[in-house]
Image (tube, rainbow, N blue to C red):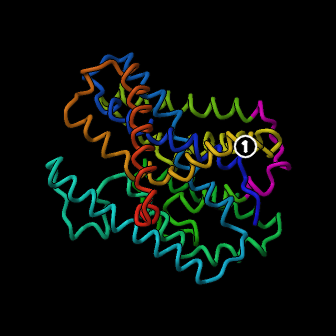
């Protein structure tokens, strides 16, 4: 059995907390004009810095799955599991939104539109899993030069697609395997960084500076656009934004090279990391239930964002972790989390 890569597990553990931070801070960001500018700025700093988390999940999948040789049976089981998870949580959030939150969700549209916004991740991963066997064969047979060439070409395609979101143009053509979304791109980037992490000619300090610079540009562009338009404008925070891509890639490079790419915590810390990471998918799925409860009864103006965001992030992460831990004591709970 292949030894677990704790650099990737460390990225996973940090990322699932940052995802919660995105959803919490974004609630306050969308209250621009209602909360003081200082609180909006703090919320935006957290939101911007945490954006590296979602691309990291895709890159972790790429690092773990691309280049592997797996049976068709294993691929089918993976897809069926994801479909079952999507079905269960779509029903959960459909009932939650219609019966408790009193928001309209059309049941017949769940096939195309998530019952809750954060379930988009499942919709994005299922098509990737469908073509994963072909991507794995491709990665196993490409030379380093061809892998680098593919990365350069796909980077150009992603940047071109991002540009069209501002101009309103629609591309007549699309790049095969990359598409109009950026998720397959992150998948391949994670595979490439993991495979060649010791050969990438970027020093750790340089990667940290680039990461911070990219976040600062995203923050500044979003802040400027928001002030100009009079409402929270987050186009520069989308996962196809050049500086979000750059920050995410640098974050991944930094973390995967911790301790020269061989991060080995003590046995006690390994157990803690394993426990959190085993629950991370379930935490992602369930945490919105607790955030929705806060939104239902509290307004962004009720508490200062500087206290509410870190406090809510910690509490929601902790409560979600406990709930998932309990759920995973059952066979069904393990299958849907």
Residue 80 image offset from top left, x and y in percent: 46, 76
Instruction: Name the residue rendered at 76%, 73% in the picture.
Output: 140
- Is 14 on the left-hand or right-hand side of 121? right
Q: Secondary structure at mark 1?
A: helix
Residue 312 image offset from top left, x and y in percent: 38, 30
- Is 205 on the left-hand or right-hand side of 51? right
Residue 130 image offset from top left, x and y in percent: 52, 76
| Quadrant including the C terminus | bottom left
In front here: 78 or 162?
78
Instruction: Name the residue rendered at 65%, 34% in the picture.
Output: 211
Above or below for 303 versus 28: above
- Residue labelled with disc 1: 267
Q: Let me know if residue 201 is in the magenta part.
A: yes
Q: Quadrant of residue 185?
A: bottom right
In front here: 21 or 264?
264
Q: Decide if residue 156 is in sight here.
A: no
Q: For the magenta stretch, what is the residue range?
A: 192-206
| Quadrant including the N terminus | bottom right
Above or below for 72 versus 212: below
Residue 199 image offset from top left, x and y in percent: 85, 50
Above or below for 112 versus 239: below
Q: Decide if residue 53 is in sight here.
A: yes
Q: Quadrant of residue 257?
A: top right
Q: Let me know if residue 245 is in the magenta part.
A: no
Within 10 angstroms of label 1, few (less than 14), some, or many (20 or more) residues? few
Instruction: Name the residue rendered at 76%, 63% in the picture.
Output: 2
């Amino acid at each position: 059995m292949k030894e677990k890569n704790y650099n990737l597990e460390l990225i996973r553990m940090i990322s699932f907390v940052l995802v919660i931070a995105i959803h919490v801070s974004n609630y306050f960001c969308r209250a621009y004009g209602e909360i003081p500018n200082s609180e909006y700025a703090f919320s935006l700093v957290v939101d911007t810095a945490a954006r590296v988390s979602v691309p990291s999940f895709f890159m972790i999948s790429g690092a773990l799955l691309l280049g592997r040789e797996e049976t068709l049976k294993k691929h089918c089981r993976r897809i069926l599991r994801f479909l079952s998870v999507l079905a269960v949580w779509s029903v959960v959030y459909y009932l939650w939104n219609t019966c408790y939150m009193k928001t309209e969700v059309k049941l017949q549209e769940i096939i195309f539109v998530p019952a809750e916004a954060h379930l988009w991740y499942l919709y994005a991963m299922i098509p990737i899993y469908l073509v994963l066997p072909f991507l794995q064969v491709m990665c196993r047979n490409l030379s380093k030069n061809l892998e680098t060439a593919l990365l350069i070409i796909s980077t150009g395609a992603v940047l071109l697609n991002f540009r069209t979101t501002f101009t309103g143009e629609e591309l007549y053509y699309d790049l095969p395997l990359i598409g109009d979304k950026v998720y397959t791109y992150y998948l391949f980037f994670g595979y490439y960084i993991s495979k060649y992490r010791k050969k990438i000619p970027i020093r750790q300090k340089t990667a940290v500076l680039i990461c911070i610079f990219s976040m600062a540009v995203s923050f500044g562009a979003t802040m400027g656009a928001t002030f100009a338009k009079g409402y929270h404008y987050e186009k520069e925070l989308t996962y196809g934004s050049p500086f979000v891509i750059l920050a995410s890639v640098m974050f991944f490079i930094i973390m995967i090279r911790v301790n020269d790419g061989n991060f080995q915590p003590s046995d006690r810390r390994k157990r803690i990391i394993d426990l959190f990471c085993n629950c991370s998918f379930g935490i992602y799925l369930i945490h919105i239930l607790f955030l929705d409860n806060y939104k239902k009864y509290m307004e962004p103006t009720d508490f200062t964002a500087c206290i509410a965001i870190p406090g809510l992030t910690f509490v929601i992460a902790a409560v979600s972790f406990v709930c998932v831990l309990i759920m995973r004591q059952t066979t069904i709970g393990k299958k849907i989390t």
